[in-house]
Image: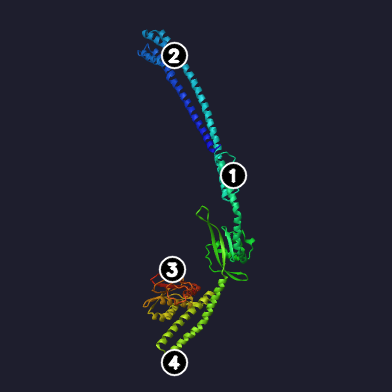
């Protein structure tokens, strides 16, 4: 039977029984009301009239109005004759009353009338008893029928309450659980419902869907396994170490290169929490330190690992693997991939380049110095007089020689920076001495462009801990750049101020300034601002940054286009 039919039949039957119960109750109540009204309107009224006539009959000798009262009640009784024999008795009373009115003193007539009134009252009393018995029987029948009908309603309602919710809900719960199993890719799930209703059709449709999903899953399984094998082979063939973790940081794959550098076997790491492995493996601990504790500042330096019987260098990259679930727009983190890029060959090439630059720069300084000395000798009068054209040529040779010496010096300093062989002579120094030395060194260069150097030194600045030569070199580099990019008849302000962290050296010019796009790149090696003079090597500011930061200081620039630039650095105070 269909669920709709069951619901219609059960609820309809209950509805019909309720209507039947209401009908029986209404009919019996109306019947009782009718019997009660009949007793009140007929028999009770007759008793009331008879009682009044008896009272009037007793008072006829003393009250002149008694006859009128008797006659009025007799007239009402004549209109209220309902019981068998009541009409004859009432008519007999009427005849006797007519005789009594002619002979009011006759006691015998009064006795006869009184006897007839008693008969009349007895008839109505018997009628009341009979009608009460009928009403009681009707009430008892009504109670029986109401109880029977109510019991049937209760029984049907109870059966519906027990059977109907379970009949509707249980298949839904079973279907819901089966859908959850299908969602978890358990395509072998089936629903078995021994029913003959809509749920059987729903279960049959669900089973067909699950069967098709299982068939589709099995048909794709071989392809999925093949693709999985392909990916695993590809990862193992990679020359860079690769480690895969799930969202709980459990290792789910690791290639041969990663096993080689960690010194572990595949069985020791697969399906194991990476934290547990890191406890006994220093390299694994270094690989996951910023993954386990993201608050730790990431170390950008390459990892130096002894691999293939030599020191190798690797750059670490941790990639978060996120997916969008089907039908959802929220991304979910499902794991991490730790990738180590082998940069050993680039490190070796960079070292070779640095050594080459250092060697060439060192070798070039000697001939350049000889050229510079030769030009100085040519300028002396003992070697002969020079015409104007020769002097111009010598000036050009001197400028080019000076530029070459500056570039070779910067290259040598850069090679020291790259190899980490910066030699610092740290000592406690008066920062004012460095400022005055830098200004004296660049004064002639500034005078040639008619630029005025302003010195603004705050008094009583404590000594700083610095390498005087390299710190002065940085300040001179700032001043040289400021002079180079300033227009004639302008000024440059060299300031020295007290700061909480140390002495603040700054050089402010009023040139064209630096675009905000290039502020972060200005201290990178070989970088030159597009459109600027190309007379430098692009190394001066990069070397300055290394010199200052190696001494524990900070360096930076503030600039706005058209407003000039302020290059500054801070060197820590001496603790002595």
Secondary element at image label 1: loop
Q: Residue at x 53, y 65 (%)?
A: 298
The 10 Å Cα crowd at callout 1, few under 14, some 14 to 19, many 20 or more, is: some
* Residue 344 at x, y percent in the picture: 57, 70
Question: What residue does disc 1 label?
Answer: 191
Question: What residue does disc 4 label?
Answer: 382
Residue mark closest to the camera, 3 vs 1: 1
Question: What residue does disc 2 label?
Answer: 86
* Residue 418 at x, y percent in the picture: 53, 74
Q: Is residue 185 left or right of residue 408?
A: right
Which of disc 4 and disc 1 is earlier in sequence?
Answer: 1
Choose between 393 and 454: the one closer to the eye: 393
Which of disc 1 and disc 3 is earlier in sequence?
Answer: 1
Give the Cα distance between marks 1 and 4.
116 Å
The 10 Å Cα crowd at callout 2, few under 14, some 14 to 19, many 20 or more, is: many
Give the Cα distance between marks 2 and 1.
82 Å
* Residue 568 at x, y percent in the picture: 44, 73
Q: Is residue 79 above or below residue 369?
A: above
Q: Is residue 338 visible?
A: yes
Q: Which mark is residue 517?
A: 3
Residue mark closest to the camera, 1 vs 4: 1
Residue mark closest to the camera, 2 vs 4: 4
Which of disc 3 and disc 4 is earlier in sequence?
Answer: 4
Which of disc 3 and disc 2 is earlier in sequence?
Answer: 2
Q: Residue at x 61, y 63 (%)?
A: 236
């Amino acid at each position: 039977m269909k669920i709709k039919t069951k619901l219609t039949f059960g609820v309809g039957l209950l509805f019909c029984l309720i209507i039947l119960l209401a009908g029986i109750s209404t009919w019996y109540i109306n019947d009782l009301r009718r019997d009660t009204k009949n007793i009140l309107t007929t028999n009770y009224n007759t008793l009331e009239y008879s009682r009044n006539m008896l009272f009037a009959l007793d008072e006829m000798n003393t009250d002149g109005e008694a006859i009128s009262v008797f006659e009025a009640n007799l007239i009402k009784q004549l209109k209220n004759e309902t019981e068998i024999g009541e009409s004859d008795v009432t008519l007999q009373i009427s005849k006797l009353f007519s005789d009594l009115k002619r002979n009011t003193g006759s006691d015998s007539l009064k006795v006869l009338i009184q006897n007839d009134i008693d008969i009349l009252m007895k008839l109505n009393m018997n009628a009341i008893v009979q009608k009460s018995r009928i009403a009681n029987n009707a009430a008892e029948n009504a109670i029986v029928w109401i109880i029977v009908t109510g019991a049937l309603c209760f029984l049907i309602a109870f059966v519906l309450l027990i059977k109907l919710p379970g009949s509707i809900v249980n298949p839904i719960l079973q279907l819901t659980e089966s859908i959850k199993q299908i969602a978890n890719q358990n395509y072998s799930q089936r629903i078995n419902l021994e029913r003959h209703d809509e749920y059987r059709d729903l279960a049959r449709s669900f089973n067909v869907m699950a069967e098709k999903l299982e068939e589709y899953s099995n048909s794709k399984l071989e392809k999925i396994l093949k693709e999985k094998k392909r990916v695993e082979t590809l990862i193992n063939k990679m020359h860079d170490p690769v480690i895969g973790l799930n969202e709980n940081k459990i290792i789910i794959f690791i290639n041969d290169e990663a096993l080689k550098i960690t010194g572990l076997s595949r069985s020791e790491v697969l399906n194991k929490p990476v934290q547990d492995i890191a406890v006994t493996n220093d390299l694994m601990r270094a690989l996951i330190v910023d993954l386990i504790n993201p608050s730790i500042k990431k170390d950008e330096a390459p990892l130096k690992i002894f691999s293939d019987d030599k020191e190798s260098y690797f750059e670490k990259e941790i990639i978060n693997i996120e997916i969008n679930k089907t039908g959802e727009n929220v991304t979910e983190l499902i794991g991490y991939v730790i990738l180590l890029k082998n940069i050993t060959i680039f490190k070796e090439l960079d070292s070779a380049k640095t050594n080459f630059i250092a060697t060439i720069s060192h070798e070039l300084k000697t001939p350049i110095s000889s050229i510079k000395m030769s030009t100085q000798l040519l300028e002396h009068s003992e070697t002969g007089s020079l015409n104007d054209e020769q002097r111009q040529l010598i000036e050009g040779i001197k400028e080019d020689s000076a530029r070459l010496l500056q570039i070779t010096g910067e290259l040598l300093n850069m090679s020291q920076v790259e190899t980490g062989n910066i030699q610092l002579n740290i000592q406690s120094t008066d920062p004012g001495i460095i400022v005055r030395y830098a200004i004296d060194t660049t004064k002639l260069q500034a005078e040639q462009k008619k630029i005025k150097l302003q010195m603004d030194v705050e008094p009583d600045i404590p000594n700083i801990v610095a390498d005087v030569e390299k710190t002065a070199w940085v300040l001179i580099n700032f001043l040289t750049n400021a002079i180079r990019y300033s227009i004639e008849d302008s000024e440059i302000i060299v300031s020295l101020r007290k700061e909480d962290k140390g002495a603040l050296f700054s050089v402010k010019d009023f040139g064209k300034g630096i675009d905000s796009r290039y502020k972060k790149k200005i201290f990178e090696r070989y970088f030159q601002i597009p459109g600027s003079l190309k007379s430098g090597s692009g190394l001066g500011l990069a070397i300055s940054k290394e010199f200052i930061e190696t001494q524990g200081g900070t360096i930076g620039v503030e600039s706005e286009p058209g407003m000039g630039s302020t290059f500054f650095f801070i060197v820590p105070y001496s603790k002595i």
